[in-house]
Image (cartoon, grey):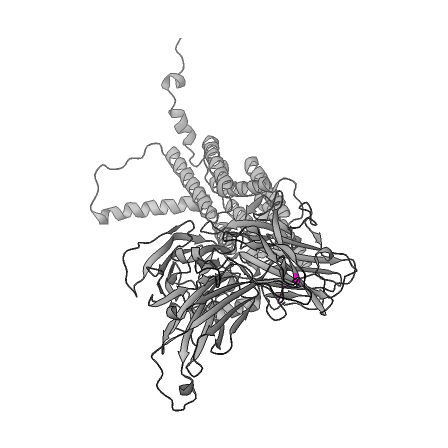
Amino acid sequence: MRAPMAAAAAAAAAVLVLVMGAGWAPGPRGCAAQGEEVVVASYGQDRLWLKPYDWTYLRVELPPSFSSVTMDFATDIDIQREHLKGIPRSKLAIICLMNSNPPIPDISDSYLDNLLSNFLPAGPFGNGNIINQSNLAQCIPFQKNTTVVLTNDQISPGVWYIGYFHGLGPARTQSKMVCLDQNISIELISRGKARLVSTRITVRGCPTSAFWGPYCNQTVEMIGCSQPSINNNSRNLLDLNIERRNSRYTREHHRRINILSQQNHLVEKEVGSNVTALVRMENSITCSISNDSLCVRQGDMKFYFLDVVNLALQFQITAANFGVLGPSLICYLRYNAFPQRDLHDYSGDISHDPLVVKSPNIGRWYIAIETVNKTQTNNTASKPVLDTMCFSLKWQLTGCLNGKSGTDCSWEAYGLQRVPRRSPSVPFESYYVPTDERASLEDSHFYLEQFLSNSSSEQFAWTYFFLDVPQGSAGALIHVQLKSDKELNYELYSKYGGLPSNDTWDYYASRTSSSNGSLFFSLQNSTSSDMDLSIFYAKEGTWCFGVKYPSGRANSQTYMSVSLQGCHRNCNQKGVCHSSVDESGLTFYSFCTCDRDHGGFDCSDELVSPNGHIWQSVFLIASNGAAILPAFWALRQKAFAEWILYTSSGISSALYHSCDVGTWCILSFRVLQFLDFWLSFMAVVGTFICMATIDEASKRAMHTAVFILTALLAATGATRSANIGIVIAIGSLGLLMGWLLEFSTARRFICWPWQINLNMPQSWPNFGTLLRNTLEVLNKRFRWIFLLLGFITLSFAATSWKLESNSNYWIWHSMWHITIYTSSFFFLCSMRVNARNRNPESNYELTRQDSLPRSETQPREN
């Protein structure tokens, strides 16, 4: 489980540390002055091959101190942006970049259209190009050479994912492999050309913690905390100064309060008090800087950062010791990036009123302070303003104790502990239960009513649940289910790294509505008593779920289950959930491999209707009946070996496709696939060998060699597209060898002149005679009309093989069956029967007899 971020002091000491994964290497750290950057990390991926409809991810971690990142991509294809609309999505190759979770560019058609219309520009970014949107990916097409340069005011530090995609759309998850069960899958033939991409990533940072910014020309200070009344020793932000407040009823008491130590472990401190009993208790962290340490020149900005390491109620900044008639003090705040005058999350004039951030997210907050002349703002005459103004600021971070949370620390809050499932189908598969004795670790759900907050003063009450998504599981999803025996009166709010509320949340769901506009959120199959929601590819770190409900004790019984799963709804029972690891080896991600009729992220898109599936099955199976044609010819010519080969090839192919489409599997899929490809290879090569009229001994030797070679092809990589060319080459070689054997056997002694005749006019008649004799032999051997039909149908078979894709596989592969068997039939029919049944030369028998020893041919003398 990933712990919250390190303490502020530890972060300040390690500002130049980059968490490096596999493939990352630290760069040189020589001496550098202000404005000079050094390489803090680099990554290289030389050759990454992506087959059609293939994809993968690369995890990149940017340290808080990075200044810029340069990404160089080199591919073997150049897709011009102006030609994008004319490229089918099935052949489109893109690279996507997304913050915190792996991108899914084709999770919906509208989302994909938006990405394709707003591609990430190459080269250095302008000031207006910001890509810190957490729910939007940025993509670029494959180009020969592309360089993207991003600075730390355009891209935030943390975890980023680069996605490489070759082919988009619902069919990306269809037919990539045939799934036999949850553990066994068979890869199908990959159609199309694989694409190559190389990646070089260089992360630069400032040489010391004193320099920050895109060009290392800005200074930043960490906010320090001091204990206000006890002593002046510096304290960490995690040390808590408990403020005891008065309420209506008083009594003496002693209370044991759980607070967080610097190591983020729970410890207990005895707090004595003779003040009033606390109706609600808050703990606060007060950080202050004196006048001597905070001075800002007119027109300059001073930068600070604060690490929020736990869920907090609010973060407040107040100015003190500031002249009333002086300039305005403007404060800018931005989460995870440097604020600017025109680019920030929060801003305000803190000269009189504090700047308050409600429920700040866990992480690093950057603060910028500048002075602005009020009179100059109002365009009125004024006395000259001092060049430098000094003042003090009070930083206050407020949170709750004793398992409370909410705006006034009056609502119950529970931490959820992760319990790994036994024998998980994908890594990190687990469920969450409260860290309370009322919940059992053996049950994957708990009853909600026993954890609800009590409140009679407000109309609605809240109960909060916190959980951590472990590091490396950003490719999983959070699944939450509420199921009641009565009508549900609960609303569910979720937020990453902060407390959700009515105004601030990432995802929302109720019985009647939800935030279904988000592409990474799904609310399905919900009824009046059941709520089922999922958050896809949940970010690593702390998540908070807030349950809102009407005040008063509920009289229903509702159980709640929270789990970390691999695939949404188990691929809707239309596929199998698999997991893989990204190229850095640091993150697992899950994906569905759907059946032939479905596709999409969770196999929810129906690509083939039930009636269409029936017709496709009929075509794929029945088209193998074309094997009857060459089998009939072989049987008629009493070529029984060829008859068995063609017949068994057609039957095995029909049985294989019957199992492939899910109709019937007489044997295991692996056995059927091997038989289909092996016998198909043998049928093609056997046709070539049959066309060479050689003796049976030579034919048996060639068949034996072909048996071994084709079996190796079928066993080691049956689905390779290159196998077709290899098999045709083997068959052509067998035919050529057969003709050479026949030619050498018919003419035992061939006399060639030892001297080369350089007189070309005298040599031409010899070549002409040889050509005429060859044509006469071929004319006696073959019927040209059948030979021409054989080549025509063979070209149709090659065209069908070339045009096959995932969407039209059934029609073109059926045409492949018909044309390849028909071409074999025409080639066999092109052979003249007399040329096959008799020896090529009439004197071959005499030659064989003359070759016997004379002692065996002459009569024995008495």
Residue sticking out furthest to the top: 862
Instruction: Tell which of 528 and 400 is nearer to you.
Output: 400
Judged left or right of residue 668, residue 285 is left
Q: Percent x, y for residue 75?
A: 39, 59
In the figure, residue 600 lies in which quadrant?
Answer: bottom right
Tally of marks? 0
Q: Is residue 490 visible?
A: yes
Residue 327 part of the magenta-drawn span: no
In the figure, residue 122 lies in which quadrant?
Answer: bottom left
State which quarter of the image contains the C terminus. top left
Residue 410 part of the magenta-drawn span: yes
Q: Percent x, y for residue 540?
A: 53, 56
Q: Is residue 62 visible?
A: no
Q: Percent x, y for residue 441?
A: 66, 46
Instruction: Tell which of 693 and 81 is nearer to you.
Output: 81
Instruction: Tell which of 236 and 202 is nearer to you.
Output: 236
Judged left or right of residue 665, residue 757 is left
Q: Percent x, y for residue 592?
A: 58, 53
Instruction: Tell which of 356 and 653 is nearer to you.
Output: 356
Give the residues in magenta: 406-411
Reply above or below: 632 against 385. above
Residue ID at (59%, 69%): 504
Residue ID at (68%, 45%): 442
Magenta region, mostly helix, strand or loop? loop
Judged left or right of residue 683, residue 440 is right
